[in-house]
């Protein structure tokens, strides 16, 4: 920085500047040395893994940095403390020559810690001379050297924690602070951002404060509307992920992450330890009982990404994070608080925990920004050469020195690494001004606010719901699937004769597309198969397996709500259309809804189309109730999974053990009803709202209407369909009807 002042004022100003940089230098160096107060020489020499370094090495390396890049070139007559230290304490600067291999830093038993402290004192004395005497030139790297040393302060804490976590004694680096009042976790909410054209990155114009080279240049990015979670994911939420098989279910994991999780036997975050009294977590204050309100910490990118997939969300991009952070003050739980572990989110509104607590994984690869050029010389190796294969984390953590991070600050780690203080903040697509909540959220909120609580059955079918439904179809009590399949097999040839050449078979609520195969086998003249389902996981799996087994068939899946789908896939255009709606799923509608659905299907399939519908017929109450309340409890699990889904995707806190599954026959409406019954008076939070339940109060989750063939024909008639043919099974009675549009 040039200071344009009359000559007589230069000296005091220069002295002020020298005083200020000396003070900064001393403060940072002292802060590093303060970290070793509780450590023994043995603690400071050990290396617990190749990625971590001994404290002694950090103390020496930061000193070597000042010696190599500032004193040797900038302080006339400077005497290098020990020429052999260049080899020992160079980290990765190729331009500075060969060095001790990183995994072997723990073998550096000499110099002793006392020698390293003497090295620090020697360099500090020389730096005092340089900082007092020097003009601007040699000082260019002071900010970099201090920021570098602050990074190593955090590394010392990360590496000591890793070392102590290997010890059977689980030593504490620091005494725990008095526990914060136990606060209930505020429900997770999302803050909406409209997106658009925004600026990101550090602006390095004249007078700009220091930033690392990788934070710039400032540039424009386009953001689609997005939503960012208002707090970090907690240990309690992570427990739910684990209880739902999060570490065992490959559908949530990236392929590389799944392979790594298998190979390493991951089943919980890095520092969680199972004990007879439940989970404990190793931290800088020792091994302590898991606090469900604390943010989950020390998870890899792969785990963070899997959690987000499980939660129906995703990780934010770094541009989204930075844009959201632009209005948040850089305050939070940094190392200066002395707590040295992430704290529960404070109550309140809006974005919390953006700075401090934990580094937040983004889904952005660590890449150069447009126009990025590494600095010339050895310090150009500082950041740029690591821009491959890593992901960016934002916001700083409880081990980061206060004042070290900026909104533009980019930390980076490999996706499998877990020893840093890393946490998870979720994001979602969409939103922005005036954007509606998801249909799931809207339906659940509206349904729970009704005097008689209900949730539409289509929301049963997340991946686990679809899996449980398939398990239900195998149960001895659940006759509909078996009966319908047998009936389809028996009638397939007759039905096939009614299917024209080159037909498009459009299936509503196709699920696993199991019954479809019976029709496809009997009717090879079908040219196009268009399954429609709301469940992406079921649809993708079914489409892939049908494609594999019917190579001549064009498969055109449509992920949509079949009650509101307006257009058939393009592949079906011009072909004679045959609708297929098996499983008596039509029984899930009320009479009015069934009529509306049949009218909509009539419009969608077009005039002259055939529509094959499976309907379950009225029968004795005992068989009906048993089919929806099986002895193994699979239907109960299917019903309760809806609450698991609400907890996961809408930040709910349903206690699953406080809701019972019940199936009842409602003779007046001719339907089986499924309910979740509240076992006691209770309040439940969902998406920021509270809902009261009396003991015995229910959430009505599904109707399954039972028909007679004549009654159904009359209903279909009101929607413009004519019953052309019906096939009926023996007891338990089920029917397939062919309607003509
Ligand atoms: C009971 S399963 C029936 C599966 C299959 N058709 C059978 O008979 O075996 C119901 C299927 O319909 C889907 N579904 C339910 N409601 C839906 C809706 N409104 N729109 C689209 N698909 C829906 C579910 O995802 C599920 O795969």
Image (tube, rainbow, N blue to C red):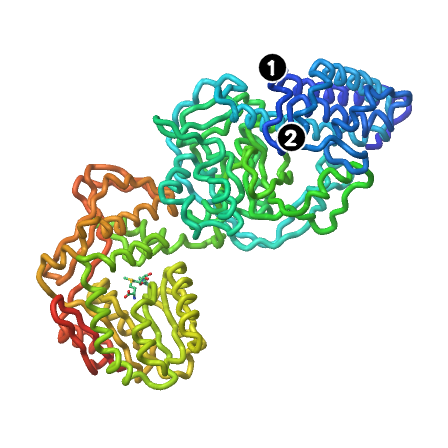
Q: Residue at the location (43% across, 78% down)?
A: 552
Mark 1: give few (<14), some (14-19) or many (20+) Cα within 10 Å. Answer: few
Query: Mark 2 and mark 1: span between their CA atoms?
Result: 27 Å
Image quadrant holding the C terminus, namely bottom left
Give percent across and percent down for residue 359.
Answer: 56, 36
Please give the residue where the numbered disc 2 appears in the rendered image: 404
In the figure, is residue 361 to the left or right of 375?
left
Q: Quadrant of ligand 1?
A: bottom left
Image quadrant holding the N terminus, namely top right
Q: Is residue 279 visible?
A: yes
Q: Residue at the location (18% across, 62% down)?
A: 479
- Label 2 or label 1, whichever lies nearer to me, is 1
Please give the residue where the numbered disc 1 appears in the rendered image: 40
Give percent across and percent down for residue 509.
Answer: 32, 66
The local secondary structure at tag 2 comes to loop
The image quadrant of residue 575 is bottom left
């Amino acid at each position: 920085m040039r200071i344009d002042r009359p000559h007589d004022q230069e000296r005091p100003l220069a002295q002020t500047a020298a005083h200020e940089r000396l003070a900064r230098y001393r403060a940072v160096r002292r802060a590093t040395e303060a970290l070793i107060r509780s450590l023994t020489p043995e603690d400071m020499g050990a290396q617990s893994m190749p990625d971590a370094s001994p404290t002694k090495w950090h103390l020496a390396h930061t000193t070597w940095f000042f010696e190599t890049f500032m004193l040797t070139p900038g302080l006339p007559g400077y005497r290098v403390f020990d020429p052999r230290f260049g080899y020992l304490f160079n980290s990765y600067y190729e331009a500075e020559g060969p060095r001790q291999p990183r995994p072997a830093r723990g073998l550096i038993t000499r110099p002793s810690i006392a020698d390293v402290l003497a090295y620090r004192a020697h360099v500090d004395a020389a730096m005092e001379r340089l900082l007092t005497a020097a003009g601007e030139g040699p000082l260019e790297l002071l900010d970099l050297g201090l920021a570098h040393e602050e990074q190593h302060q955090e590394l010392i804490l990360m590496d000591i924690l890793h070392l102590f976590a290997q010890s059977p004694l689980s030593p504490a680096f620091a005494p725990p602070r008095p526990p914060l009042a136990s606060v209930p976790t505020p429900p997770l909410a999302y803050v909406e951002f409209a997106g658009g054209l925004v600026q990101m990155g550090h602006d390095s114009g004249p007078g700009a404060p220091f930033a690392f080279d990788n934070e710039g240049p400032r540039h424009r990015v386009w953001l689609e509307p997005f939503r960012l979670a208002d707090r970090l994911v907690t240990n309690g939420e992570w427990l739910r992920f684990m209880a739902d098989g999060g570490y065992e279910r490959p559908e949530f994991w990236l392929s590389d992450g799944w392979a790594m999780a298998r190979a390493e036997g991951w089943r919980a975050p890095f520092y969680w330890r199972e004990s007879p009294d439940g989970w404990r977590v190793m931290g800088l204050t020792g091994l302590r009982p898991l606090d469900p309100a604390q943010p989950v910490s020390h998870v890899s990118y792969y785990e963070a990404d899997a959690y987000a997939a499980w939660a129906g969300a995703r990780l934010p991009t770094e541009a989204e994070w930075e844009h959201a952070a632009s209005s948040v003050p850089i305050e939070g739980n940094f190392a200066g608080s002395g707590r040295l572990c992430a704290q529960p989110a404070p109550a309140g509104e809006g974005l919390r925990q953006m700075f401090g607590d934990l580094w937040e994984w983004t889904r952005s690869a660590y890449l150069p920004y447009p126009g990025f050029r590494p600095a010339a010389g050895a310090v150009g190796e500082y950041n740029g050469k690591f821009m491959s294969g890593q992901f960016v984390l934002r916001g700083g953590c409880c081990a980061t020195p206060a004042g070290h991070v900026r909104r533009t600050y980019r930390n980076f780690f490999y996706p499998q690494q877990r020893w840093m203080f890393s946490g998870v903040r979720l994001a979602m697509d969409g939103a922005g001004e005036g954007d509606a909540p998801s249909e799931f959220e809207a339906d659940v909120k509206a349904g729970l606010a009704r005097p008689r609580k209900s949730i539409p059955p289509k929301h049963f079918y997340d991946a686990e719901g679809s899996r449980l439904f398939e398990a239900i179809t195998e149960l001895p009590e659940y006759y509909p699937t078996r009966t319908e399949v047998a009936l389809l097999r028996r009638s397939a040839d007759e039905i096939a004769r009614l299917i024209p050449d080159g037909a498009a078979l459009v299936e509503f609520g196709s699920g696993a597309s199991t019954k479809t195969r019976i029709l496809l086998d009997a009717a090879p003249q079908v040219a196009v198969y268009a399954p429609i389902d709301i469940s992406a996981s079921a649809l993708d799996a079914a489409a892939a397996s049908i494609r594999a087994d019917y190579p001549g068939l064009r498969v055109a899946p449509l992920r949509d709500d079949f009650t509101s789908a307006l257009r058939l896939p393009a592949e079906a255009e011009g072909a004679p259309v045959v609708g297929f709606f098996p499983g008596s799923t039509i029984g899930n509608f009320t009479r009015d809804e069934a009529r509306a659905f049949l009218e909509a299907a009539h419009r969608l399939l077009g005039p002259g189309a055939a529509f094959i519908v499976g309907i379950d017929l009225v029968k004795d109450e005992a068989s009906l109730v048993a089919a929806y309340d099986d002895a193994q409890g699979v239907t109960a699990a299917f019903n309760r999974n809806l609450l698991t889904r609400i907890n996961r995707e809408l930040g709910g806190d349903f206690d699953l053990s406080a809701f019972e599954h019940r199936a009842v026959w409602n003779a007046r409406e001719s339907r089986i009803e499924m309910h979740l019954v509240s076992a006691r008076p209770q309040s439940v939070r969902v998406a920021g709202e509270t809902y009261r339940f009396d003991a015995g109060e229910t959430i009505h989750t599904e109707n399954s209407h039972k028909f007679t063939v004549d009654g159904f024909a009359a209903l279909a008639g009101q929607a413009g369909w004519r019953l052309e043919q019906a096939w009926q099974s023996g007891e338990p009675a089920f029917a397939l009807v062919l309607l003509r549009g």
